[in-house]
Amino acid sequence: MISDITLGQFFPGKSPIHRLDPRTKIILATIFIVAVFLASNPATFLLLAITTVVLIGISRISMKVILKSIKPLVFILLFTAILNILMTKGDSAPLLSFWVIEIYTEGVARAVMMALRVIILIVGTSILLTYTTSPISLTDGLESLLSPLKLIRIPVHTFAMMMSIALRFIPTLVEETEKIMNAQKSRGADFTSGSLVKRAKALIPLLVPLFVSSFKRAEELATAMECRCYRGDKNRTKLVKLQYKGIDFVFTFIFALIFGGVICLNIIPYKFDSFGLIYDIIFYKV
């Protein structure tokens, strides 16, 4: 399960999304996140799902990588889906009634929409940011967008560097955790069986060396940066200067249309009830 975590990994490529300016990707990711949280009916989710599928195709990221990014979320998705199904009450007759458990159409629809929201959010933002943008480019783009905050003495460069280092070391920490876990298993450690308290205690031999290794890596990184005379953004130049291109304006215009489409689809009245329409789609009644 740990090896399936792809957050923070960068997959080099020459796709149109890879060639976008990092500032454009950050802006598009922000627009996409807002649109996902504004989505409230089947039409908006369909629009965002189509957008996500198109992004996957344009980025040329392997579907295997996409599925690996979703795999660690399966438990959370199932847990939230069950909660929504059991806790949501409807106005119509229940689909299933057993003892004190009643399942309504609205609960099933809400569970489906919640799962779609999480999947679209994770996949879409990963493709726009970490999968197609190197940590250095992401740092430069974030620093450039936040540069006006320098006028009020906010250390923008330091903040951007911290974000970049954190994203860069996520795959490293995941790999280190897997190595320590395998080493502990070879010594007889059991992380999966027993009560919750027992499994929590079994994690102590894993967490202690992981924290020690993390602090050691942080110290080595700080020493390496000092040896290279790193002094933040004071008198600092950049090897590659960021510059908007035509493709950046094209993608921005397309995402603006998608955002406008989500807003319009939320406002325009529907002939069908949202939850009922999802139910009909699920059970092949449309």
Image: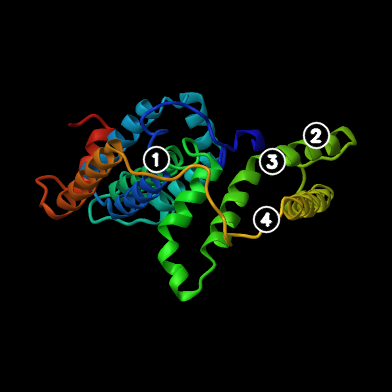
Give how far across and how far down residue 218 sits, in percent.
75, 53
| Residue linked to disc 1 | 124
- Disc 4: which residue: 230
What amino acid does circle 3 point to? Thr
Going from N to C along the chain, the mark reached first, 4 or 1, is: 1
Cβ–Cβ under 8 Å for marks 3 and 4: no
- Occupied quadrant, residue 177: top right
* Percent of width and height locating residue 256: 22, 47
Of the residues under marks 4 and 2, which one precedes in the sequence?
2
Q: Which mark is residue 269?
A: none
| Residue for badge 2 | 182
- Say which residue appears at 44% left-offset and 45% top-offset: 241
Residue indicated by mark 3: 172
- The mark nearer the N terminus, 3 or 2, is 3
- Amino acid bearing label 4: Tyr
Judged from the image, the secondary structure of the residue bearing numbered disc 1 is: helix
Q: Closer to the camera, 49 or 95?
A: 49
